[in-house]
Image (spheres, rainbow, N blue to C red):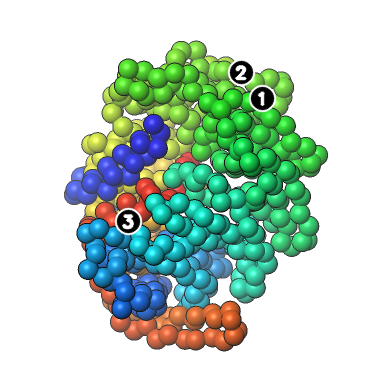
Amino acid sequence: MFKMKTIQIILLIALACIPFQPLAAGTSIKQMNTTIIADLNQTIDKDIRGLVDTDRLEIELGPYYNVIWSPDEKNALVYVFLNVCPKGKGDTQSGYISALYITDAGFSNISRVAWTEFTTTDYGKLINAPSWSQSGDHFAYMELTQGKMYSITSARLLVLSTDLQQVQEIEMDKHMDQNPEDPFIYKWSPNEEKLAVPTPGKLIIYDPVKNNNLTFYIDTTVSFITELEWSPDGNKLTFLESPKGIVNIDVDKKEQHQIYPFETTGLYNTEWSPDSKKLVFYDLNGTDKNDEGFFDIYIMDENTNTTERINLKKSSYWAINWYPDSERLLVVDYSNGSSKLCSISTTGDVKVLFDGAEMIEGHFGPDDYTSVLDLYTSKLVVFNESYEQDFSNVTRSSWFNNDLMFTTDSKTSILNTSTNTMWEIPISSTTPDLISISPQEHFIAIDNMVLAMNYGNSPGTIARDQKNDSASQVTVLNSSNNQEQKINTTTASQAPGFSALLGLIGFVVAMAFVHIKKR
């Protein structure tokens, strides 16, 4: 049920491409000072197109770029996807080239780390879920071998240092079930250089620095691991061992125990409270006349050593996130064919925050601010107890640190709720779900453009014609002979249009192309 809602959400966001309407009174609007530091169509585009075997394949859509900065912003990964198909068979067959690149902060030294090809006729491999360690000294990505109907026949995880030395190559459990909301079945610790990975028959916590591992055994002949998540303090790991139930691991004590032993249970995208003392999960409790599931919310509280259901009435609650006080949850109630955004306390008290929409996407921001995007009307509402403001024709919204970023077809806007100031970047995006902002908000990537941002007081302009001539090459690392090959990339390709966006949406739904962490 929830995966179907996810598909509806993605499609509705894509179709909400209509002009932006005026702001509510009282907001200070400023144009962001920005500088183009890279045009990926001038660099990576030619390299990934050169990987296509034009004797067999033809390019349909793309490339699409997902820029992922390291926590210290010294480096960035660029995950790239290109739709292809066997020649003359675009109506019946499909495929893609996926590639991963690493670059310095200035995008002047770009290296291709790996690439793969898949077609529905010959099958092949997919690169997926690249991510950084918390220090930014290491990164990891998955390489999935796929067969008929995109089934996973083998999987491995590669861990590398920023100087591209391979630290670990790990065989993963090929029976893993990837969640379209979160394809990262492996997880870095939030505060240490440790990596939890499900492997055949085991869950292993790797330490690429100290090179010592911690192993927990799982009977994968009858179950597999999904929804793996660390607690914020890094002391606990929780996962769903399907179909057995929820398992918790105390990393310090090296102990594991089952929390809730029922196959109807599941974990939300948010699990542990900010204080790492409470775990939220759900249990399916029947369906309504429309075959929509009723979800009971449970909280395991380490403070009281209890596990209790907190919802007082039968409903289809879906938890989005914990409030900072670790005493309340932001939830969506999907009951009765509509969507209500609510806060629910750990004692079961419910407060309706937003009502009257058929399908919504909610996020929690700083200072008890909440944002709600109505996916049918494309109206974004931002509010807390003393403030409310709305924006029309919004295609995507997400909180970054203390700022709310949202997009329309004509611009990208960043709203600071503490100062009621909105910074505008007059660049639209054909793939708003792939817009990314660096951890310290110094950079933003919009489609093929990477911009440096300056929150100065004086309005600025976009240097639209600026070219980064220092990044006119992509270094290809050939691990077989340790030689480097530089490919000149001076011809820009045409930016993808709306049809390309729809092609990407299909891949997001089927293969979990981009990781979107809800806040």
Q: Is residue 128 above or below residue 25?
A: below
Against 454, is 313 above or below?
A: above
Where residue 434 sits, quadrant-wise, is: bottom left
Gap between marks 3 and 2, in whole Å?
41 Å
Q: Which amino acid does label 1 sit on?
A: Asp
For disc 1, the marked residue is 301
Pointers 1 and 3 in contact (C-beta within 8 Å): no
Dot placed on the residue nearer the N-terminal end, 2 or 1: 1
* Quarter of the view holding residue 260: top right
Query: Which quarter of the figure is the N terminus placed in?
Result: top left
Which one is earlier in the sequence, the residue at label 3 or at label 2? 2
Q: Name the residue under label 3.
A: 504
- Residue type at numbered disc 2: Glu
- Picture quadrant of residue 64: bottom left
Front position in the image: 114 or 54:
54
Q: How far separated are the C-alphas under marks 1 and 3? A: 41 Å
Q: Residue 30, percent across and down? A: 32, 55
Would residue 349 appear left or right of 494 to someone viewing this image? right
Q: How crowded is mark 3: few (under 14 residues within 10 Å), some or many (20 or more)?
A: many
- Residue at 41% over, 28% down: 332
Measured as percent of width and height from the top left, residue 420 is found at 38, 43
Disc 3 marks which amino acid? Leu
Q: Rate crowding at label 2 as few (under 14), some (14 to 19) or many (20 or more) other CA atoms within 10 Å.
A: few
Q: Where is residue 52 in the image (x, y as percent from the top left)?
A: 36, 75
Horizontal side of residue 389 vs 479, given as left or right? left
Decide which of tag 1 and tag 3 comes sooner along the chain.
1
Q: Which residue position is annotated with label 2?
A: 308
- Describe the element under mark 2 as helix, strand or loop: strand
